[in-house]
Image (tube, rainbow, N blue to C red):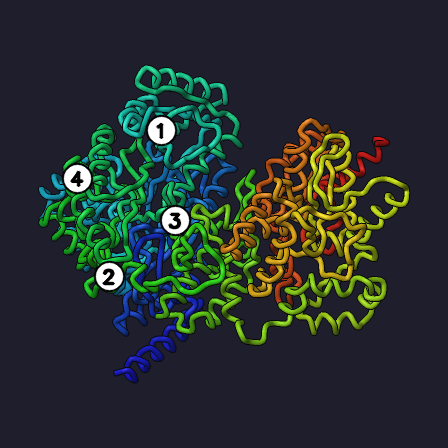
Amino acid sequence: MADRTETEKRDLAEELAAAVRGEVSFAAADRALMTMDASNYRRVPRAVVAPLDAEDVAAALRVCREHGVPVVPRGGGTSIAGQATGVGVVLDFTRHMRRIVSLDPATRTAVVQPGVVLDDLRAAAAPHGLTFGPDPSTHSRCTLGGMIGNNSCGSHSVAWGTTADSVRELELLTYGGERVRAGRGTDRTGAPTGLPPRLRDGVKGLVDGELALLRTGYPDLPRRISGYALDALLPEQGTDLARALTGSEGTLGVLTEATVRLVETPAARVLAVLAYPDESAAAEAAHTLLPHRPMTVEGMAADLVGDAAGLPKGGAWLFVEMGGASPGEAAARAEALCRAAAADGSTDHTVVTDPAGQRALWRIREDASGTATRLSDGSEAWPGWEDCAVPPERLGPYLRDFRALLTQHGLRGTPYGHFGDGCIHIRVDFDLLTPPGIRRFREFSYDLGELVVAHGGSLSGEHGDGQARAELLPKMYGPELVRVFEQFKSLWDPSAGLNPGMLVRPARLDENLRFDVLPKRPVPVEFGYPHDNGDFSAAVRRCVGVAKCRNATTAPGSTDVMCPSFRATGEEQHSTRGRARLLHEMLAGEVITDGWQSPEVRDALDLCLSCKGCRSDCPVGVDMATYKAEFLHHHYEGRVRPAAHYSMGRLPQWLHTAAPLAPALNALARTPLATVAKRLGGIAPERPIPPLATETFTRWWWRRRKTAARAGRRTEDHRPAPSPSGGRTVILWADTFTNHLSPEVGRAAVRVLEAAGLRPLLPPTAPLRQPGGALPQPSLPRLHRPPLCCGLTYVSTGQLDRARTVMRRTVEVLAPLLQDGHPLVVLEPSCAAALRTDLPELLADDPRAARLAQSVRTFAQALEELAPDWQPPRIDRPVAGQTHCHQHAVLGDAAERRLRERAGLTGRLSGGCCGLAGNFGFERGHYDVSVACAEDQLLPAVRESTEETEILADGFSCRTQLDQLGDRPGRHLAEVLAEALGEAGE
């Protein structure tokens, strides 16, 4: 039997490869990437095919049909009901079939292939004042094919309806190879147009025979997405076959092209945020706002938005967008709505006219599908009942009953969503790991299905039925109409080859759960994973598949970092989601079978820059940089590592040894010997080796102190004490990069800190003790001792044993100096992030590590907290450059922005990652991706700047990338301020 299976697999692979011009893959990594969507479900496909065009789709269907293999069409993989997973051949439309074929502003239509990302269509339509109306929160990565398959909606559906309202014509291929051009209207026989004879007669006969049931069997509500929309085939509905096929979830045909309607966008938009005492009050009020013709009526409660700024005081909010021909008209309409809302229960409101302010608030809403997966206490919550919908006027009573049902089953969740359309999104803290928890999930699902139907609602109000809800369709439609659904499916797909187990004749809603395959006990790991109770599996489970990491471009005004490698390559395996999927499958051991030794996971992580962007930008806080370090530690444990791990992973050690030889080594770096050294060290041949400082920062510091001592001034080298001016003492961290490669940054920081009345001190290189616990005052440290280290380079290369060793030494030395609350000022953002997060997570058993992490401050944070009255010199120049990705992800840059503003440095810094990212951009094989990351935001921003613009880059990697790839160098903010102090004569 095994030999027969292997033969069939080989034959299928050979025939697909011969028939399809696009990519055909049976590789474990590619299959693993497609096992899940954004639902609770998992299926392992046999192969993945990326067709070039419709002819490729037809060829793939023919081969699969001959082998009896099912086919699953897939777009962005953000479906929440499981319909983008399957056991056969997955057709991945995101790789090639993503062309906007045409766009006609006169007829307000566009012709698109199924892989077109929604935001790409919206961008193409925008210059004509048009847009595609439906806009789910995944608009930056979901595809038109997926939206048509699920009949997606989004926040603007109160104005522009569902995807079905925007579809004009569909071109499909059935599993049997028949071509269908579905539109609206009938042919001379009264059958829907565009059907081949077999389907024409069968569809007409089925509709004619069930007219009464089709006219009475569907609830009347704006968000009725569940089931097949066969009522669209009624004569009084215009016999709209395109509309009937929208929302069929790839079970009837494979979409190859679509003609869609575009709508005119208002010239101006204003966001009114209405506050209510609680979510029930907001739900009760939502439908009363519809007569004001809003564009959105979105609801959220306090347990989801937390302490978000910009919201009026309340317990729940409605986000209501109003449009107008001018900003004044839009604002006037918003104010009128707010007055009406105040008379009907709203307790407060704010009207946001600033586009940047609107984007910030909308981001809260758009990230909700991810943030809702973690409750306030850190508990996991899951989809499954993500988008039930009821008539809008029933939303208040339904929501109260829904809350009561949660309580009855001992469950919790955070409702939010499209209140104006009566559609509720929620993630519930189901236990999907144990048999009792799964039974409760099933029982709750049945009870909630009955509740939704009792309120006249739809099991799905946006994301389709898939496997999550299809089992319950008889509750909503009754057995007779569900039987008609099955007959319709059999007409189109008699072999049941398209997306079987979805929508009709479905698998049970508690089968194929994605967590069944994960280890039942935590696997041994090195990091503490404090937010996941030390469980690496729980950390990997954080990725629910909403795929914000697959954004190919950055939204205007965004400072997001995630995910630079995906934006550079466009490959799923180089997205945060893709890597999380591979780690999930590694833990499962079914597709990825080599565990920590997996080459598939290693290769996917190879292009991870460890930028930490996902730690902050991923709505659920996936931390791929930490997962990568964990994997590399286990993967190379007891084995020979790549050369770059020895050369750059142990950089602090080498730089300390090389410091006395800096002039000679700098000279050698300009000779052909550098080529040999780079080859031996695993360094990209395209990269110049940065010059070493001929005088390190620490030598400059102690030389300066020694000079001061000889001049008779007091030097209290290590004892924390107030300065004569009353300023606070700060411990200045001499990181490896500042010390050996850019000491000018350290010198500038000392000058600025002292000018602000602070007293910077460098820590010693070994614990200093004397009887009674007081700190002695040596004249100078022993410079031959290795310097303290945050462990960053060891962590990024997965040398976690060495990282822990150097971190323990750092804690041992610093703990006495920081015990009185003195801050640790770190100039290099990546080192600050390592001390803030990696150190306490690797030394979870040492409480001193957590105290050290809490003491870390950036340069700007220290000035703001400890010298709030100090006025920096006025520089009055625009800025360009980049916020360091680690600072963005771990530390935030609010203090830096405020300091720049006080100094007259205007403008914003770019988001993204510079692409050098420590050792990443220097490693052999990474140069092209590194450059592509720099070209994403940093280099264009610098090129577009004027001559008087100050180029800021606090990270050594960012400055090095600018030096090597750009026309203008970047400087640390401390350097800019120190120079201005000199110009001011201070």
Observer-side mark, 3 or 4, equals 4
Category of crowding for the residue at label 1, using alpha-carbon neighbours closer than 10 angstroms: few (below 14), some (14–19), many (at least 20): many
User: In the image, what residue occupies the spot 40% across and 20% down?
Assistant: 348
Circle 1/circle 4 CB separation < 8 Å: no
Category of crowding for the residue at label 2, using alpha-carbon neighbours closer than 10 angstroms: few (below 14), some (14–19), many (at least 20): many
Number of the label disc, if any, that sits on residue 144: 3
The numbered mark, 3 or 2, whose residue comes first in the sequence reads 3
Q: Amino acid at mark 3?
A: Leu
Residue at disc 3, secondary structure: helix
Category of crowding for the residue at label 3, using alpha-carbon neighbours closer than 10 angstroms: few (below 14), some (14–19), many (at least 20): many
User: What residue is disc 2 on?
Assistant: 500
Question: How far from the left and from the top, in percent, is residue 691?
Answer: 79, 59
- Using the numbered discs, state the Cα–Cα distance from disc 3 to disc 2 in whole angstroms: 22 Å
Q: Nearer the viewer, residue 32 or 77?
A: 32
- Using the numbered discs, state the Cα–Cα distance from disc 1 to disc 2 in whole angstroms: 41 Å
Number of the label disc, if any, that sits on residue 451: 4
The numbered mark, 3 or 4, whose residue comes first in the sequence reads 3
Classify residue 538 as left or right of residue 975. left
Q: Amino acid at mark 1?
A: Ala
Question: How far from the left and from the top, in percent, is residue 30?
Answer: 42, 66
The numbered mark, 1 or 3, whose residue comes first in the sequence reads 3
Observer-side mark, 1 or 3, equals 1
The numbered mark, 2 or 4, whose residue comes first in the sequence reads 4
User: What residue is disc 1 on?
Assistant: 316
